[in-house]
């Protein structure tokens, strides 16, 4: 049986944790249950994901200001595209879902929005993103959270293309938004 990204929804609290100077991260639910293990492969700008059910995903650059999440057979599950010059607004989507990842005024805080309303929040610690608290008020697709982690915790690698410092090509309607 082939699983869909809709089989991987997160709701309620969760935490992304990594020791200092480590490339390994762990995503745990609010009850402490392991959801995924993540590993950053910095030199090639890729992250790997091992889910608790044994599924394996890869997060990789996909051109100018775009990062995608693919499964083991190579099918794209979701993508995130930079939509502002300062990297403070991203579009996340895949299959049957779509939302925006927007920087909050507080340092190291982000929120997922649909129609300007928050559906989930990410909050890093005061000094780093080594501990990220996640609060999903509505069901959030796990691929969206993992892509957000990839671009927020390691933004210099998210674009990964020489022209990656500009918003992704599009209709231009959001390029001036902060």
Image: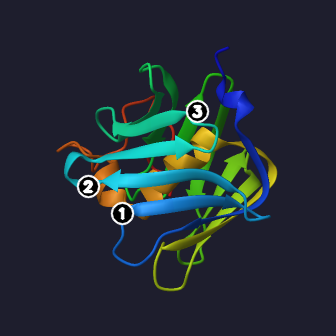
Q: Could you say which disc has been placed on residue 116 in the image?
A: none
Residue depicted at x 70% and y 37%? 8
Task: Pick whichever, 82 or 54, lies toward us.
Answer: 54
According to the picture, the residue beneath numbered tag 2 turns out to be 42
Residue depicted at x 56% and y 39%? 92
Where's residue 86, x and y in %?
39, 59
Distance of mark 3 from mark 1, alpha carbons?
A: 26 Å
Residue depicted at x 54% and y 78%? 107
According to the picture, the residue beneath numbered tag 3 turns out to be 93
Q: Is residue 92 found left or right of 6 in the rendered image?
A: left
According to the picture, the residue beneath numbered tag 1 turns out to be 23
Q: Secondary structure at mark 1?
A: loop
3 or 1: mark nearer the eye:
1
Quadrant in the rendering for residue 62: top left
Where's residue 127, x and y in %?
47, 85
Distance of mark 3 from mark 2, alpha carbons?
A: 24 Å
Using the image, determine if residue 93 lies above or below residue 31.
above
Q: How many numbered dots are placed on residues in this image? A: 3
Where's residue 124, x and y in %?
56, 74
Label 2 crowd bin: few (<14), some (14–19), many (20+), radius 10 Å: few
Quadrant in the rendering for residue 131: bottom right
Q: Could you tell which of marks 1 and 2 lies nearer the N-terminus?
A: 1
């Amino acid at each position: 049986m082939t699983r869909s990204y809709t089989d991987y929804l997160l709701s309620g609290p969760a935490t992304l944790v990594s020791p200092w100077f480590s490339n390994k991260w762990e995503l745990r639910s609010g009850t402490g249950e392991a959801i995924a293990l993540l590993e950053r492969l910095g030199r090639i700008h890729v992250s790997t994901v091992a889910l608790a059910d044994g599924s394996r995903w890869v997060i990789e650059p996909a051109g100018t200001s775009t990062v995608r999440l693919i499964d083991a057979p190579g099918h794209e599950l979701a993508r995130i595209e930079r939509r502002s010059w300062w990297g403070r607004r991203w579009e996340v989507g895949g299959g049957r879902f779509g939302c925006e990842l927007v920087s909050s005024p507080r340092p190291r805080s982000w929120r997922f929005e649909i129609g300007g309303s928050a559906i989930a929040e990410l909050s890093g610690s005061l000094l780093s993103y080594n501990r990220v608290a996640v609060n999903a008020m509505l069901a959030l697709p796990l691929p969206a959270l993992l892509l957000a982690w990839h671009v927020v915790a390691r933004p210099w690698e998210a674009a990964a293309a020489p022209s990656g410092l500009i918003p992704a090509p599009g209709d231009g309607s959001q390029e001036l938004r902060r």
